[in-house]
Amino acid sequence: MPSFHPPRRLLLGPGPSDVPQRILDALARPTIGHLDPAFVGMMDELKEMLRQAFLTRNNLTIPVSAPGSAGMEACFVNLVEPGDTVIVCRNGVFGGRMRENVVRAGGTAVMVEDDFGQPVDPEKLEAALRAHPGAKVVAFVHAETSTGARSDAATLCKIAREQGALSIVDTVTSLGGCEVDVDGWGADAVYSGSQKCLSAPPGLSPLTFSARAVEAVKARKTPVQSWFLDLSLVMAYWDGVGGRSYHHTAPINMLYALHESLVMLHEEGLRAAWARHQANHERLRDGLAQLGLDLLVDARHRLPQLNAVVVPEGVDEAGVRRALLDQHGIEVGAGLGPLAGKIWRIGLMGASARPDAVDRLLEALATLLGRAA
Ligand SMILES: Cc1ncc(COP(=O)(O)O)c(C=O)c1O
């Protein structure tokens, strides 16, 4: 069997995004022991850089050794105990996964529903909290990757906090691409992914817990049912007082990659990175308008890094996506759930958020759709 050599692609889907050579080079550095003092020093830098990216001073800020879904699960299994009520806001596919997590942790999920493509409605959340005053947690997705809608995280976290509930916030697609302000929002448990606007390969989930969330974990009456994701055990490795103890073998080279991606984010500047995502979104939006293509989400709630494009009547959605990949080497995403077949999802995330990538996609679309770019 020969070695595997992947084709070169321009990744403009819902993630992963293009990984810069500098991050791939970091990944290829020599593997050392996960308790080696040099490695432990790198872990401390990584935690600090994650705090800067999340805009938080939370002590418990680490990358979970698995993809974004594991960050999501870590939040639910640590904060939800059997019998707890959790308000889950669903305005896309990932809110549905949150519900699954609540149910599997033995909790009762109270759903706040909004249409796919809409942001979470704060008034509906307020009404749900009034109807369920004992709710322990409010969970929502800040950046819904399935639709490209951004919800008002500051307002939703404030509502949760005023009612004495903790908040779990999914920032898998937002971290590094638009404003995520964990301390400013007063959010309690927030997770993300390495493969979107941070442009590292998939496989790690940055996570941060507020002091209130840590207290809630400590106050549990039952042990966390997941041994691997039990944060009190994981922290003995990431934060061990008087020395780190073995929990699991950390994905050492992947952590080098995440470290490098955060160094690059730091060099660019967090706000400059947000502005770059916005500028490239506007370039794409204008180019799509010239091609007569519409975006699904209202301008007020649009994410710059995930653009849901309405497939015009009579156009073969899957055929265009396939031709983009086969003829132009460009990956874009399909619609999920009720939006399957109705939209293309164009990601401008991390290193993929650049003008030449936008222009290449617009030219390819113009060719395939037979319209003038
Ligand atoms: C909003 C959101 N949450 C969670 C996930 C799950 O992340 P992963 O695929 O890395 O497990 C994704 C992945 O696309 C996502 O977009």
Image (tube, rainbow, N blue to C red):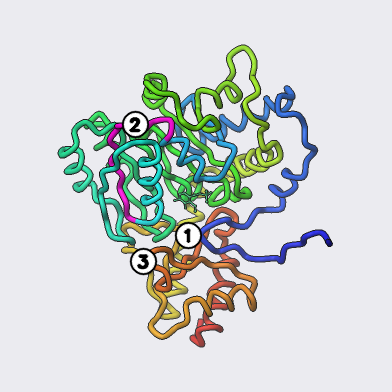
Q: Which of marks 3 and 1 is in front?
A: 3
Mark 1: which secondary structure? helix
Q: Earlier in the sequence, mark 3 or mark 1?
A: 1
User: How far across and down, in percent of the image, does residue 142 sit?
Assistant: 38, 47
Tell me if residue 342 comes above or below residue 196 in the rendering. Answer: below
Q: 28 left or right of 168? A: right
Q: Which amino acid, by three-letter code, is at mark 1? A: Ala
Q: 219 left or right of 363? A: left
Residue 78 lies in magenta, yes or no? Answer: yes
Residue that mark 3 sits on: 338
Mark 2: which secondary structure? loop
Task: Find the residue positioned furthest to the bottom.
Answer: 370
The magenta span reads 77-91
Q: Distance between the residues labelled 1 and 2?
A: 46 Å
Q: Are marks 2 and 3 in contact (CB under 8 Å)?
A: no
Mark 3: which secondary structure? helix
Q: Earlier in the sequence, mark 2 or mark 3?
A: 2
The quadrant of the picture occupied by the N terminus is bottom right
Number of residues whose C-alpha sits closer than 10 Å to that of mark 1, classed few (under 14), some (14–19) or many (20 or more)? some
